[in-house]
Image (cartoon, rainbow, N blue to C red):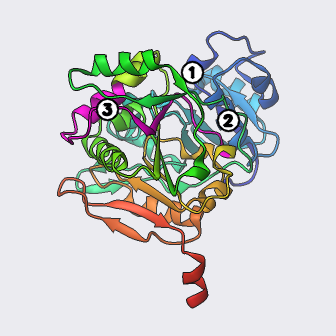
């Protein structure tokens, strides 16, 4: 992906608002010592592993010409590549360098439109993107789909995780608020023992996916089916806290609103085999000797936080494509490279969203019979 020369990594200025750096350009080790959001820390670590002696910088947009640009060129020296770590609020390029973008925070609803906004507002800057890291986005230019090539990059090992907090799914027939209050009143429950179930499904919900009718319907259908299959365990990760989803009550409300709005009818009683988690499940959580663990997510899930080894251990990986169909070919190529096999199914969901992409691990017996 990267050519010759060193690489500079630009980071969102908003994430550095409460810390002090030695300047606008600094060594990556300095950033890692600062108090920064964990997802930014992991994104920096991931791309730094690609680079030889990488640098970091903030606000590249203020060093575009004149004395400021000459100063930047002096600081960058042999740098030839630029990776923009974008939270979705803006995608920045540095003229004269090979530019790449890593949209590392797409779970927020408003951050999913960054690529289309850049093409609409500054097509000359969009044209300078050599690749997009761990996303498969495109944007329409007239009747043509414009899409920087996708590069898949996963960590060698998963970083430390917060211990998950589990809550029992307890819907109410009356309102979302009552359901959320009931879940919180029941309090945390113990961690499920996955080996006691014949199948386990993990569905990480984001603010973005909760506002996608197709994803919400698939989520609700999975919940309804799990009610009547006590041997199946369903684990639902609530949307991460952000400016719109600030606390547990709001995390629950966003998820329960999506389920209620799907139109899927389900029992109104607590389900001991359906649990809600406030945090990402650690990779070690899936390390049990289990033959059937699945995951389902859409384009707003930070799948790059898990290792390739984990994905290849899973029984099935299901991906809900965007309703506009942009990037499906790139998604298939990307996840097929991660999993080492093509998708087993492209199941039709509805006319509006024509397919669910699913990669299923071949059984040992099937492999022997080939």
Q: Percent x, y for residue 334?
A: 52, 60
What span is colored magenta in the figure? 254-283
* Residue 102 magenta-highlighted: no
Mark 2 vs mark 3, foreground winner is 3
Give the x, y percent position of residue 292.
54, 60
Q: Secondary structure at mark 3?
A: loop
Badge nearest the viewer, 3 or 1: 3
Mark 2, residue position: 42
Residue identifier under label 1: 62
**Nearer mark to the viewer, of 1 and 2:** 2
* Residue 249 picture quarter: top left
Q: In percent of the image, x 58 and y 36: which residue is there?
A: 84
Give the CA distance from mark 2 to mark 3: 39 Å
Name above or below for residue 276 compared with residue 51. Answer: above
Where is mark 3, residue-wise?
Answer: 269
Say whether residue 120 is left or right of residue 60: left
Q: Is residue 256 magenta?
A: yes
Q: Nearer the viewer, residue 230 or 219?
A: 230
Earlier along the polypeptide chain: callout 3 or callout 1? Answer: 1
- Residue 265 visible? The answer is yes
* Residue 352 drawn at (x, y percent): 19, 53
Label 2 element class: helix
């Amino acid at each position: 992906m990267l050519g010759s020369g060193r690489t500079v990594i630009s980071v969102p200025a908003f994430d550095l608002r409460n810390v002090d750096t030695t300047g606008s350009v600094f060594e990556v080790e300095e950033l890692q010592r600062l108090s920064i959001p964990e997802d930014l820390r992991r994104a920096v670590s991931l791309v730094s592993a690609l680079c030889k002696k990488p640098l970091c910088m903030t606000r590249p947009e203020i060093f575009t010409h004149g004395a400021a640009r000459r100063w930047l060129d002096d600081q960058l020296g042999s740098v030839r590549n630029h990776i923009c770590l974008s939270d979705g609020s803006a995608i920045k390029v540095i003229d004269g360098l090979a530019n790449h973008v890593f949209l590392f925070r797409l779970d927020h609803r408003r951050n999913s439109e960054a690529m289309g906004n850049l093409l609409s507002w500054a097509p000359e800057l969009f044209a300078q993107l050599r690749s997009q890291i761990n996303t498969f986005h495109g944007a329409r230019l007239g009747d043509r789909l414009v899409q920087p090539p996708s590069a898949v990059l996963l960590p060698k090992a998963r970083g430390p995780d917060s211990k998950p907090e589990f809550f029992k799914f307890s819907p109410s027939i009356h309102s979302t608020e009552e359901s959320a209050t009931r879940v919180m009143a029941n309090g945390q429950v113990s961690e499920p023992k996955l080996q006691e179930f014949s199948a386990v499904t993990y569905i990480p919900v984001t603010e973005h996916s909760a506002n996608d009718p197709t994803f919400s319907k698939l989520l609700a259908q999975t919940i309804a089916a799990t009610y009547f299959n006590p041997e199946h365990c369903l684990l639902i990760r609530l949307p991460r806290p952000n400016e719109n989803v600030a606390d547990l009550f709001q995390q629950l409300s966003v998820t329960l609103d999506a389920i209620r709005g799907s139109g899927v009818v389900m029992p109104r009683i607590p389900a001991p085999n359906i649990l809600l988690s406030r945090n990402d499940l650690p990779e070690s959580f899936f390390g049990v000797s289990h033959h059937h663990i699945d995951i389902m997510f859409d384009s707003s899930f930070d799948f790059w936080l898990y290792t390739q080894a984990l994905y290849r251990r899973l029984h099935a990986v299901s991906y809900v494509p965007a309703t506009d169909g942009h990037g499906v070919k790139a998604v298939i190529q990307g996840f097929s490279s991660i999993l080492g096999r093509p998708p087993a199914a492209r199941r039709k969901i509805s006319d509006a969203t024509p397919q669910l992409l699913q990669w299923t691990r071949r059984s040992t017996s099937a492999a022997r019979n080939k």
